[in-house]
Image: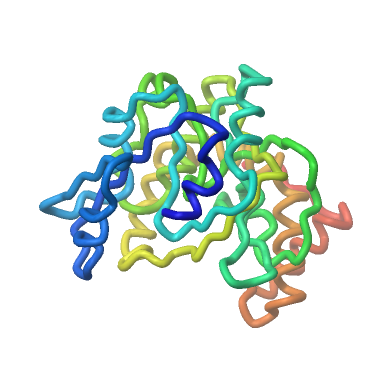
């Protein structure tokens, strides 16, 4: 909370909305003690990421919505570059940023790319450097752990699909934005730290979420995004195999090498 106020106060007008999704610890008491300047909401039953954020979007009053997970830590000038990017290019639908693994020198997210078999993956996962520093770059999707979108556009496009439960809501939203002929970008000079997957039961519905994602977007992903992303995905997977060889599939790693060398090419399925 202090970090938010320190990084934003005096730079822009903002409101802070927080929703507690049935915390079991002393979070409720903490939130009730925040005082003026914070609008807090408390659920009587667990509603999940999509429903909670859609509710807060309807409650918000500002021009922009910045979705910020409770396990994201901000520092420096992180929000202004995201707003500036959207103000400069009216064709941008959503803005993400670079995310480091909290307490580490390694990065976790610089944009989302799709593998040849259609799985979304964070580009830059495990990297110790930022290859696109100083740039604003388009990606197939961005993570909603920290992202910016115009409130009116978010509501017009339908918000997060509430059929997803704590996973793939952001990828689905970005695919709808792309289908609406707008771009999903990352401002690579905005950097935050993310604990990643800290919420209890974060991966409980992964299989159902991926199944729903492919029901909606499978053909598009395999014929468009996976083809366009093949070099970026291959580089990320190749890098992962170097620093964490125990975590990769050997055949997929060799496939990534062959794609990087342009010996093979992913073609539309």
User: In this image, 92 relative to 15: left or right?
Assistant: right
Decide which of 268, 23 is in the foreground and name it: 23
Residue plotted at (55% across, 53% down) = 74
Q: Can you see residue 115?
A: no
Decide which of 229, 174 is in the foreground and name it: 174
User: In this image, 253 relative to 47: left or right?
Assistant: right
Q: Quadrant of residue 254?
A: bottom right
Decide which of 172, 252 is in the foreground and name it: 172
Residue plotted at (55% across, 26% down) = 93
Residue plotted at (33% across, 55% down) = 208
Up-down: is 212 above or below 236?
above
Up-down: is 33 above or below 161?
below
Decide which of 114, 70 is in the foreground and name it: 70
Q: Position of residue 221 (x, y in %)?
A: 56, 40
Q: Position of residue 177 (x, y in %)?
A: 51, 27
Q: Position of residue 201 (x, y in %)?
A: 31, 66
Q: Quadrant of residue 159?
A: top left
């Amino acid at each position: 909370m202090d970090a938010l106020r320190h990084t934003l106060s005096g730079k822009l007008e903002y409101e802070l909305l927080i929703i507690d999704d049935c915390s079991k610890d002393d979070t409720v008491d903490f939130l009730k003690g925040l005082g003026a300047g914070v609008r807090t909401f408390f659920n009587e039953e667990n509603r999940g990421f999509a429903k909670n954020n859609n509710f807060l979007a309807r409650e918000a009053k500002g021009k922009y919505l910045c979705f910020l997970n409770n396990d994201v830590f901000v520092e420096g000038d992180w929000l202004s570059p995201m707003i500036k990017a959207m103000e400069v290019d009216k064709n941008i639908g959503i803005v993400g940023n670079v995310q480091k693994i909290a307490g580490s020198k390694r990065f976790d997210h610089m944009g989302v790319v799709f593998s040849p078999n259609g799985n979304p993956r964070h580009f830059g996962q495990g990297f110790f450097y930022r290859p696109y520093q100083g740039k604003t770059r388009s990606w197939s999707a961005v993570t909603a752990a920290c992202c910016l979108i115009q409130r009116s556009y978010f509501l017009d496009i339908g918000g997060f699909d509430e059929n997803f439960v704590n996973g793939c809501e952001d990828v689905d939203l970005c695919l709808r934005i792309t289908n609406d002929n707008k771009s999903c970008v990352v401002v690579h000079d905005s950097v935050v730290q993310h604990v990643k997957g800290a919420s209890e039961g974060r991966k409980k519905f992964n299989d159902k979420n991926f199944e729903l994602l492919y029901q909606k977007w499978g053909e598009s992903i395999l014929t468009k995004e996976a083809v366009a992303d093949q070099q970026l995905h291959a580089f990320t997977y190749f890098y992962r195999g170097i620093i964490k060889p125990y975590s990769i599939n050997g055949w997929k790693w060799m496939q990534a090498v062959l794609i990087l060398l342009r010996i093979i090419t992913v073609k539309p399925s």
